[in-house]
Amino acid sequence: MPDNSLTDKQSTMLKWLWLSGLIIVLDQITKVLASNLLQMHQPVPVMPMFNMTLMHNTGAAFSFLSDAGGWQRWFFTVIAVVVSTVIFFWIKKLDRTEKLQAIALAMVLGGAIGNVIDRILFGYVIDFIQWYYDQWYWPAFNIADSAITVGVTLLIIDSLRATRKISTKQD
């Protein structure tokens, strides 16, 4: 009887990579729209505590290293490509029962690639979503950043669930 485990793992990988692709497409479309419809650093109120504000981030999260002189563009690009490669092979090895982990990894992968595209094409990441309260403004972000954040949160939840299952079995 042939071993179908490779086929199952490949179908599991393909089953979730569509989510990465969807995130990349949505991210890039919204960035094009933001770049064409918004003016740099000019907030457009959408609702209380929420603006659309076009910004270009040459650094990492929270503009970390944004004024480092240019080397950070390739540094963050290389890191994202390496992480994306690791995630791709991680998804490939997952069992079909590890759905939450697959969704989480696919989201992180899509977000990482979405931001890498910006870094390669422009030398910065296009951000446009801005939350604020009173005079406190959260740094602007984008769909890719949101996917990464949700994906990492789901990975943490999945990890905690797995840890809880292991401790319950040992008791």
Image: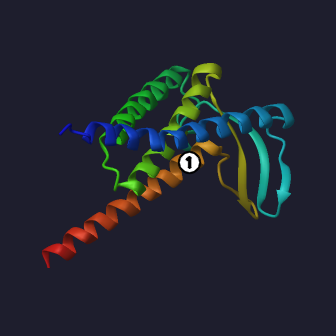
User: Which residue is depicted at the point 67% across and 33% down?
Assistant: 28
Q: Residue furthest front?
A: 1
Q: Measured from the top left, where is residue 161 in percent x and y?
A: 33, 67
When the figure is inspected, residue 167 is found, relative to residue 118, above or below; the finding is below
User: Which residue is depicted at the point 42% across and 57% down?
Assistant: 100
Q: Name the image quarter holding residue 57.
A: top right
- Quadrant including the C terminus: bottom left
Q: Name the image quarter holding residue 166.
A: bottom left
Is 92 placed left or right of 144 in the picture?
left
**How would you rate the neighbour count of disc 1 (Cα within 10 Å): few for under 14, some for 14-19, many for 20 or more?**
many
Residue picked out by circle 1: 147
Number of numbered discs present? Answer: 1
Is 126 placed left or right of 84 in the picture?
right
Q: Along the line of sight, which residue is nearer the eye, 33 or 41?
A: 33
- Quadrant including the N terminus: top left
Q: Along the line of sight, which residue is nearer the eye, 102 or 68?
A: 102
Q: Along the line of sight, which residue is nearer the eye, 112 or 162?
A: 162
Q: Along the line of sight, which residue is nearer the eye, 117 or 127?
A: 117
Q: Measured from the top left, where is residue 66 in percent x and y?
A: 58, 32
User: Which residue is depicted at the point 50% across and 26% down?
Assistant: 72
Q: Say what amino acid the circle numbered 1 marks.
A: Ala
User: Which residue is depicted at the point 52% across and 47% down?
Assistant: 148
Q: Measured from the top left, where is residue 111 in percent x and y?
A: 54, 40
Q: Measured from the top left, where is residue 65 in percent x and y?
A: 53, 34
